[in-house]
Image (cartoon, rainbow, N blue to C red):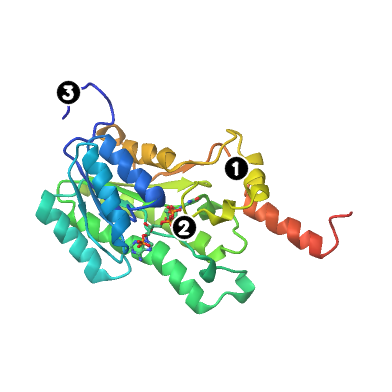
Amino acid sequence: MRDHGLVFDLSGKVVVITGGGRGIGRGITRAMAKAGANVVVAAREVQPLLDAVAEARGLGVEALHVPTDITRPSEIGALVARTLEVFGGIDCWVNNAGSATTDDIGPLIDLTEKQWDVVVDLNLKWTFFAAQAAARAMTRGGSIINISSRSGSQPNPMTGHYGAAKAGVENLTATMAVEWGHMGIRVNAVAPGVVVTENSVVLDRPSRRRRQLETIPLRRLGTVDDIGALCVYLASDEASWVTGEVIQVHGGSRIPIGLLSYLYHVNERLGWNDL
Ligand SMILES: NC(=O)c1ccc[n+]([C@@H]2O[C@H](COP(=O)([O-])OP(=O)(O)OC[C@H]3O[C@@H](n4cnc5c(N)ncnc54)[C@H](OP(=O)(O)O)[C@@H]3O)[C@@H](O)[C@H]2O)c1
């Protein structure tokens, strides 16, 4: 332990972050490293991982990158094996890899099996099997953090299958917490609202950005550091009695903006907005 008297000290802990090279995952990696954890970042594209490793080392911790496609069981296995080989254990595993690209979304009435499989497999199936692999390797206990979304607990026009996958993650989080509690493994989910990343195309238009802001009592969009800070807490010993929870982080916004926008457009098409 570092002798600086701070809480949330992760010195000596080993944290694996899937999708840790960019977006929210990069924010989580940075936050973990700032708190003193050694970090392992895993995703398909190598350069963002190298950048994350360089940043973490600059913060004074050890860092490792393992190119990984999380949808391939052999690569999940290799990620666990390499982490154990280099660091000798895993204290925290953050299941952050996930998304739904514009090619894979649309109204439920038109949704194809392929779109369903791509999104639900990445966000639900492989999140589960990555968590299972992590739990099997956590012989000294640990903390698993599943990155869900506010979409997991609200209607999501145009991304219904993504929301269903995240709802599944939240439900599995509760069961994992129960089944793995006696192994000293805590499992929690973090459900962010809108967080700005380099990929936030949905916020490109100023009108969309403004509409989002209007629903957020704290009057700003989320940052990757907001999510990183919560993950540091959940990885820390201070959270040692917290498990099975879904913690929402959204600046107080409880209004599903995607639903409102969708209904607005439907009403416009039906000529109801003039009523
Ligand atoms: N941004 C938001 O507003 C928001 C809100 C709520 C929840 N979330 C959730 O937060 C998490 C991160 O989202 P983000 O906005 O940061 O997304 P992002 O910028 O698109 O990043 C996604 C990350 O996941 C990795 N990834 C994707 N497919 C992968 C695969 N098959 N194997 C390994 N890694 C893979 C990507 O790396 P590679 O492409 O290099 O593999 C990338 O690092 C996701 O679970 C998302 O659902 C985001």
Q: Residues within 10 Å of mark 3 (few under 14, many from 20)?
A: few
Is 192 situated left or right of 47 in this image? right
Across and down, in percent, residue 208 comes to 65, 50
Q: Report helix, strand or loop for mark 2.
A: helix
Q: According to the image, label 3 marks what residue?
A: 3
Viewport quadrant of the N terminus: top left
The Cα–Cα distance between marks 1 and 2, rounded to whole angstroms, is 17 Å
Tell me: is circle 1 under 8 Å from ligand 1.
Answer: no
Q: Report helix, strand or loop for mark 1.
A: loop
Across and down, in percent, residue 132 comes to 27, 60
Q: Amino acid at mark 3?
A: Asp
Specify the quadrant of the image occupied by residue 124. Answer: bottom left
Tell me: is circle 2 under 8 Å from ligand 1.
Answer: yes
Single out the mark in the foreground, 3 or 1: 3
Ranked by sequence position, the earlier of labels 3 and 1 is 3
Residue at point 28%, 26% (across, down): 7
